Image (cartoon, rainbow, N blue to C red):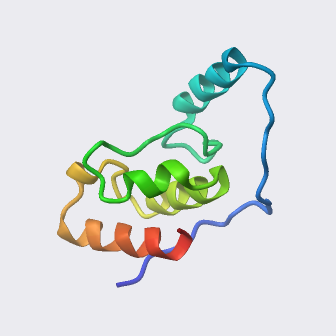
Amino acid sequence: MNYLLPEFEPSSSYAIEVTSMDVYARLRNLDEELVGSEDYLGFSWWWSGGDDYKHILREATAWCRKRIHDVLVHNDIPLIEEERNEDQQALALEVYRQYL
């Protein structure tokens, strides 16, 4: 099975150090609004509790989560595992394995 890659903007892995939990919460809230768009930053969780890769995604860098998110969105694969059909799930697992 093949999937298409979006035209990624040149980017690098990055870390943002926040000064307080309030700042982090605000950043995450902003990113929640960006889930499903190309502007998603990689901080907020977009997967469901039933996703096979949820524990790995939690520990992944924002860069990895953004790459996976962007490939899934670009290929019209639902972000929530329960909303995927069998073929979409197979492609999603391929994408996870590629970037994790």
Q: Position of residue 49 (x, y in %)?
A: 29, 42
- 67 above or below 32? below
- Of residues 62 and 91, the one drawn nearer to the viewer in this rendering: 62
Residue shown at 79% from the left, 51% from the top: 14
- 91 above or below 32? below
Residue shown at 78% from the left, 46% from the top: 15
Q: Position of residue 31 (x, y in %)?
A: 60, 32
Residue shown at 59% from the left, 66% from the top: 6
Question: Residue 99 appears in which quarter of the rendering?
Answer: bottom right
Question: Residue 42 appears in which quarter of the rendering?
Answer: top right
Residue shown at 55% from the left, 43% from the top: 37
- 19 above or below 51? above
**Residue 43 in the figure: left or right of residue 12:** left
The quarter of the rendered structure image containing the N terminus is bottom left
- 48 above or below 76? above
How many marks the image carries: the answer is 0
- Residue farthest bottom in this picture: 1
**Residue 90 in the figure: left or right of residue 71:** left
- Of residues 73 and 99, the one drawn nearer to the viewer in this rendering: 99
Question: Residue 43 appears in which quarter of the rendering?
Answer: top right
Q: Position of residue 38 (x, y in %)?
A: 60, 48
- Residue farthest top in this picture: 22
